[in-house]
Image (cartoon, grey):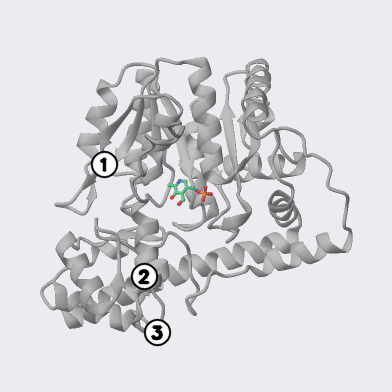
Amino acid sequence: PASLFAAVEMAPRDPILGITEAFVADKNPDKINLGVGVYYDDNGKVPLLECVRKAEAQLMEKLAPRSYLPIDGLAAYDKAVQELVFGANSPVIQEKRAITVQALGGTGGLKLGADFIKRVTPNAQVWISDPSWENHRALFEAAGFQVNNYPYYDPATRGVNFDGMLNALKTMPAGSVVVLHACCHNPTGADLSDAQWDEVIRVVGERGLVPFLDMAYQGFGDGIEQDGGVVHRFAATGGAMFVSNSFSKSFSLYGERVGALSIVAVSADEAARVLSQLKRVIRTNYSNPPIHGGQVVATVLSTPELRQTWENELAGMRDRIREMRRKLVDLLKQKAPGQDFEFVIQQRGMFSYSGLTKAQVDRLRNEFSIYAVDTGRICVAALNSKNIERVADAIAQVL
Ligand code: PLP
C-alpha cells in the first residue's frame, strides 16, 4: 500500500541554521560564526548570568512539587513582566486594561497573539517590515493570515526608508495588523528615531491600525527603560495593542523558552473578556506553560538585589556590543581606508546589516571560514577581542 507520507516533500532548510551546520562541519580551527542570533561573551560563549545562577540556587533550596501552572502562567511572572514592559506606574496597569500571559519565548507570544487575532478579526491582513525577522512571515501565515511587507530598510542610506514606511501605513485598511520591532530591529539594526515613532504612533491611531510590537531585545539598545519607551508611548494612546516580549537574549535563557504576550484593551471589562478567550487559545495549544524559566525570571525581577545584578549584567552585554561596533569601525578605517562604516555605530542591538554583498559573504566563508548571512547580516555579539582583528582583515580583503 502507498505510504501516507509518499507525497511529503522535503522542506527548505532554515537559512540561518544552515549556516551553523556548515560552520560546524568546517575544519578550520580559526573559523568564526557571525551568522548566529545569540549573544556571546568575550570568550565566545553563551553566558550563564549571575542573576540566573543565584535565582536558581534560591529555588533549589526550597524545591517544590511540580503541579500545573495556571493556563496564563505564573502570576508573579505575569505581574513582573507587565511592569517591565509597560512601566510600573503605567495607567494601563492601574486601570486594569492590560493583560499579560506567560508564553514560550517571544515566538510563543507572537503565535498566541496571531491565533487570538485570527479569532477576533479573521479577515485582517498583517504587515511586517521589509526585511524582518525571518519567522514573522511564516508564523503569521501559519496562523492563517495574508502577510504583506511595508518598506523599511533603505540600502542607500543604510537607515530606515521612513517616507516609504509612513506612506505604506497611510494606505493600509483600518484594522490591519502592523508588526513593529520595538527596538534593535532584526535583521538590520536600523531603528526609528523618537520623532519618527511619534509619526508612526499618530498614523497608526488615525487609521485605526492594530500595532503588534515585537520586543525581543529590550535592554540591548539604549537601556531597559529607553527601549521600552515605544511600548509606553503606544500604551498612552488609549488604543488596543499587542506586545510580545522575550527573555531569551536579555536573560540568556534561550532554551528555557521564556517570553510573554501582553494585550491592552480599551476597558477593564474588555481586558477580562480578552484574557478569557486568550486562555482558550493557550489551553488548546499546550494547556499551560512550563515552570522553571518563568520562576527564574520572576525571582530576579522581583528581588531588588537580583534585579540590580541583572540590570548590570544586561548593561554589560549592551556595552560590549557597542564596544565591538566601535572597534570594528576603527579597524576597518585602518584596513579599508576610504570605505565608510560609521553606520555600524548608529545601528542598535545584536545585528548589523553590514552592506556586504552575497558574493562578499561567499568569499568570507570560502576563503576565511567566516560565516555571515547571505543578506550581509552579521551578529555583532559574536565578535570578541580575540576574533575581531581577523574579521576586520577578512572584510577589508573581500571589499
Ligand atoms: N522576534 C524577533 C525580532 C527575534 O529576533 C526573535 C529571536 O531571534 C524572536 C522574536 C523570538 O524570540 P524567542 O527565541 O524568545 O522565541
Q: Which residue is pictured at 56% across the width and 63% down the height?
A: 314
User: CA–CA distance between discs 2 and 1?
Assistant: 30 Å
> Is 291 above or below relative to 68?
below
Quadrant holding the C terminus: bottom left
Choose mark 2 or mark 1, whichever is in front.
Answer: 2
Name the secondary structure under disc 3. loop
- Which numbered circle lies on residue 23? 2
Which residue does the image show at 23% across and 81% down from the upper left?
393
The answer to whether any part of residue 132 appears in the image is yes
Q: Nearer the viewer, residue 233 or 118?
A: 118
Residue at the outermost left position: 338
Residue at point 35%, 51% (across, down): 13
Q: Quadrant of residue 385?
A: bottom left
Per the image, the residue denoted by label 3 is: 386
Amino acid type, mark 2: Phe
**Disc 3 and disc 2: Cα gap in Å?**
18 Å
Q: Earlier in the sequence, mark 3 or mark 1?
A: 1
Q: Position of residue 133 (x, y in %)?
A: 37, 46
Is 374 positioned to the left or the right of 240 in the image?
A: left
Asked if disc 3 and disc 1 are in contact, CB closer than 8 Å, the reply is no
Q: Which of labels 3 and 1 is toward the front?
A: 3
Q: From the image, tell me which residue sits under label 1.
A: 152
Q: Earlier in the sequence, mark 2 or mark 1?
A: 2
Amino acid identity at mark 1: Tyr
Say above or below: 62 vs 399.
Answer: above
- Disc marking residue 255: none
**How crowded is the residue under tag 3: few (<14 C-alpha within 10 Å), some, or many (20+)?**
few
Q: CA distance from mark 3 to mark 1?
A: 34 Å
Q: Position of residue 215 (x, y in %)?
A: 49, 45
